[in-house]
Each structure stands twice: as C-alpha cells, then as structure tokens.
Amino acid sequence: MLAYLLPALISTWWMPSLAFSKGNERILTRFEAPQGHSRVQAAPNSFAAWLRNLPLLPPGSPVVLHNGERKTRQDVHAAVLDVSVGAKDLQQCADAVMRLRAEYLFAQGRFNEIQFNFTNGFKAEFRRWKKGERINVVGNRCSWSASARPDSSHASLLSYLDRVFTYAGTLSLSKELRPAEGSDIEPGDVFIQGGSPGHAVIVVDVVVTNEGQRAFLLAQGYMPAQSIHILKNLYEPTYGAWFLEGVGEVLRTPEWTFAWNDRKRW
C-alpha cells in the first residue's frame, strides 16, 4: 500500500536524529511484505512512519555488546539498527524501547514530551534536564537541582537517557504504557513483562492481508546492553523476520515468550 509513497516519505518528513546515519538502508526497504500482505497506512511524522524508516547496518552485521564484544547468540537477529549502544551496560531491553521513543520525539522537536518514570515513580523530564537541572538520588528519594548549563543538544539527550536507564526498567515502563488488548496491532506497540528480570520488545512495522491478518516486525535490546536488532521468527522460519498476530497461544520470540495480552502502547 505504501510502496508508491516511499520516495516522498523519505524526502519530505524523515528527520533523523544526530545518532543516525542518513545514507543507510531502512527497515522499509530491506524487509519486503510477505506475499499477500501490504503495509498498513502510516501518517507522515507519525511514530509508525518513523520506526519503519529506521536505518540499518549493512546485512550480516553482528549484534555487539556495550564493550565491543560480539553477543554470544548471533542467530536471533535479522538486522541490526544503526543506533548507538553506549559504553555502559545500561541500554538493555526496556531501555532500547525508551531510546527509540525518545529519539522520535527529539527528532520531531517535541522535547516536553520526553519523560519517563523511575521504578520508584519519580518523573524524569527532559525539559528540565535540558535547562541544566540534574537528578539527585539518595536511597529511594529523588530530587532536582540546578547544577549544569542549559543544553538541548543530542548529546544532552543521551546523557539524560543514561540517567533514565539507570533507574527505570521493564517494571516502570509497563506501568506507564496503556493496554492495547482488543485493538489491532500497530507499529510502536510494545510487548512487555515487567519484573526482575522482565523483557520488552517493540513493534517496528506491520503489514496486513485483504482479510485483515496482520504480521509484524519486532526489535529488541537485551542483557547485557547490546545493539538494538530486528528479531528472526525462529519458530516459523518461512516468514523470515515477520510474526503473525494471534497465531498460537503465545508470542514466541527467540529469547522470550510473551502472552498476547502483554501488548501495550504509548
């Protein structure tokens, strides 16, 4: 459905953040819809359109850890996103989901909407961080203090996210998101189980048949912190990286199993 719109979408609305390369292949161009499916409509500047245009590293690129080593399992990914990991063991599963959401809002200039809750319920807002305020954590108590210079750069965003990743996770994110059960799956939806450990994966693209059967691509980070990557469907390999909505009693991904009602959205 969107094939004829691809050149226009990329040239008119695509605003990558400073972390992303401009010349790379995108999810939309590398992953063709399965036979009989077409991509669901995505409005310009929407999270759905932004996600399916995320840049990818060249085919065959490995998933690497925050320390530069290769992940032990290299059989679970179909592609690697061209998104930085960082040098610390922070950007894991829920963190990868929050990273993508924050990058989208940053690219749109919607700074005041970039906010996430810590596990203790404290609201960490980028609008305050970019003004030079910093978060002090003492035990289970958090407070803001003006201790830095104002900075609304992308580097400031990454510094803010490091703080978020330290004190937020699947448990806090699962409480922030709203249930999506009973609605059609959409790009941007998140399958999440909050806990220690828990896990989260994000839907980055969706296709549909004329009969309404949907299939979707999933991206994840994992432990330890590693490249965000597109998952393979190891349980139905004929579909490559596409997963079929509602097929089977549970959603089986290579490294985690979700219930279908674990799906939430922003």
Image (spheres, grey):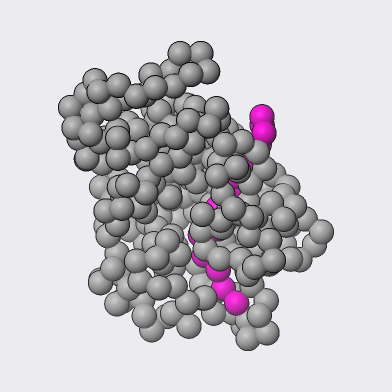
- 236 in magenta: no
Q: Nearer the viewer, residue 174 or 51?
A: 174
- Dominant secondary-structure state across the stretch colored magenta: strand
Magenta residue span: 195-208
| Residue positioned most to the bottom | 210
Q: Nearer the viewer, residue 76 or 3?
A: 3
**In the depicted structure, whether residue 106 falls above or below residue 212:** above
Q: Residue at x 51, y 72 (%)?
A: 32
**In the depicted structure, whether residue 96 falls above or below residue 107:** above
Q: Is residue 92 visible?
A: yes
Q: Is residue 66 left or right of residue 174?
A: left
**In the depicted structure, whether residue 208 falls above or below residue 96:** below
Q: Residue at x 34, y 66 (%)?
A: 45
- 202 in magenta: yes
Q: Is residue 117 left or right of residue 10?
A: right
Q: Is residue 261 left or right of residue 97?
A: right
Q: Residue at x 39, y 30 (%)?
A: 162
| Residue positioned most to the top | 139
Quarter location, residue 222: top right
Where is residue 181? Give x, y as percent: 68, 61
Where is residue 24? Give x, y as percent: 33, 58
Where is residue 252? Give x, y as percent: 73, 52
Quarter location, residue 217: bottom right
**In the depicted structure, whether residue 38 falls above or below residue 243:** below
Q: Residue at x 52, y 18 (%)?
A: 140
Where is residue 27? Give x, y as percent: 44, 62
Q: Nearer the viewer, residue 235 or 132?
A: 132
